[in-house]
Image (tube, helix red, strand yellow):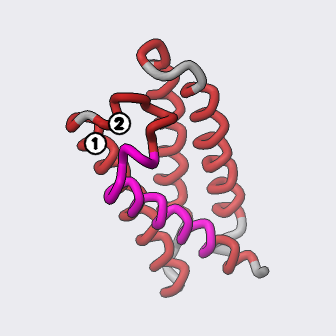
Amino acid sequence: MSRQAAVRALLAFRIAYGAALLAVPDRVTRRWLGDTARRPGGRVSLRALGARELALHAGALRATLTGERVRPWLAASLAGDLSDVAATTAARQGLPDRSAPATALVAGGSALLTALAARSVDR
């Protein structure tokens, strides 16, 4: 698989994740947020997160297809992932026991993949 194809696959996965957050936020995030994911206020925040995922990664995907710069989109995605880790860590006392370490692993891994993708684009 080419670098460009790998970046596009990553972006497509993130778009699908955003769509899932919009459609069924409590199902996608139950292990992360516990009961908060089922409450209306939790769903509002999760759908906003889903919209962020969709907008950033659809914009990045479009940039890969049109020859525009992709790195600014990936930088914003990376910032979002790191803010998810920071916010979850700050609120860890009110979340399920394994939420903060799992978020650090998942969102941190996503940030790492995004950083690697950013290195391979706009050359």
Marks 2 and 1 close (CB-CB < 8 Å): yes
Examine the structure image and report whether residue 65 is included in the region drawn in magenta.
no
Crowd around label 2: few <14 · some 14–19 · many ≥20 (10 Å): many
Please give the name of the residue rendered at 51% of the width and 62% of the height, measured from the top-left corner: 14
Q: Position of residue 7 (x, y in %)?
A: 64, 71
Q: Quadrant of residue 120?
A: bottom right
| Side (left or right) of 60 relative to 22 | right
Q: Closest to the observer: 23 or 17? A: 23
Q: Residue at x 62, y 47 (%)?
A: 111
- Dominant SS of magenta comes to helix
- Left of 29 or right of it: where is 12? right
Q: Please state, as top left, top right, bottom left or bottom right, where the N terminus lies in the image.
A: bottom right
- Asked which secondary structure carries label 1, the reply is helix
Residue at 56% across / 19% down in the picture? 97
Question: Which amino acid, mark 2?
Answer: Ala
Which sits earlier in the primary sequence, circle 2 or circle 1? 2
Q: Magenta residues?
A: 8-28
| The furthest residue to the bottom | 66
Quadrant placement of the C terminus? bottom right
- Please tell me which residue lies in front, 68 or 38: 38
Is disc 2 placed on a helix, strand or loop? helix
Mark linked to residue 37: 2
The foreground one among 21 and 60 is 21
> Does residue 78 lie above or below 95 as drawn?
below
| Total number of numbered discs in the rendering | 2
Instruction: Provide the residue designation for mark 1.
Output: 43
Check disc 1 and give the amino acid type: Arg
Distance between the Cα atoms at labels 2 and 1?
6 Å
